[in-house]
Image (cartoon, rainbow, N blue to C red):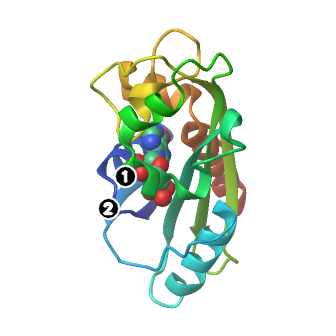
Amino acid sequence: MRIKVITSNEGKMREYSQALGELGIEVFHGKVPYDEIQADTLEEVVERGMEELREKEGSFIIDDSGLFIDRFYGFPGVYSSYALKTLGNEGVLRLMAGEERRSARFECCIGCKIPGREPFMISGECRGAITKEARGERGFGFDPIFSADGERTFAELDLEEKNSLSHRGRAIAMLAERLAEEMGP
Ligand code: IMP
């Protein structure tokens, strides 16, 4: 099976290639622009994206993700991309300076369409904490300031390790099961 991952994010693309490739699903990169609306949930963003793309594309995956910090009642959440552009990781660390309560979670919502089937969504979550300083050179986005195991940040893990713990890795594992069911024996 071959499926197009529609994203402008090379980091996400690498994670899909590693995780799905390992399960025998070949992925290729599609840079088809679609409207990422500002909404209250990741699911709404993905649903609207799928509505727009389902007419144009055969099989595809889209992904909307965010970092939810408990101390800030879930902010930046659906505003993650804006927060990364404006505050950056150093800005988030400054906002968290002196905070003992550092728990946070990443969420990933995947939208998937395969020919002859209704589009569906799958979500994955990973709980962890905002570190006190940025560490690591790998990954992308907020990876240098988030740790799932309390030791290493996502940016200190290799692709396989991040996928084995992360919100996206979990969602991809569920996606692979669903695809196996949908495609039959
Ligand atoms: P998007 O809207 O799904 O592309 O992501 C929103 C923001 O969260 C972007 O700035 C991404 O860089 C960031 N982000 C999404 N997934 C991850 C991740 O797995 N690790 C770190 N940052 C992420």
Horizontal and vertical percent position of residue 94: 44, 29
* Residue 133 left/right relative to 148: left
Which residue is the site of mark 1?
86
Q: Which sits in the foreground, 141 or 47?
A: 141
Residue beneath the point at 64% across and 57% down: 179
Task: Say which amino acid is labelled 2.
Answer: His
Residue beneath the point at 68% across and 45% down: 74
* Residue 42 left/right relative to 145: right
Task: Say which amino acid is labelled 1.
Answer: Thr
Q: Nearer the viewer, mark 1 or mark 2?
A: 1
Residue 168: numbered disc:
none
Which residue is the site of mark 2?
29
Q: How many marks?
A: 2
Q: Which sits in the foreground, 48 or 58?
A: 48
Above or below 172: residue 109: below
- Residue 11 sits in which quadrant? top left
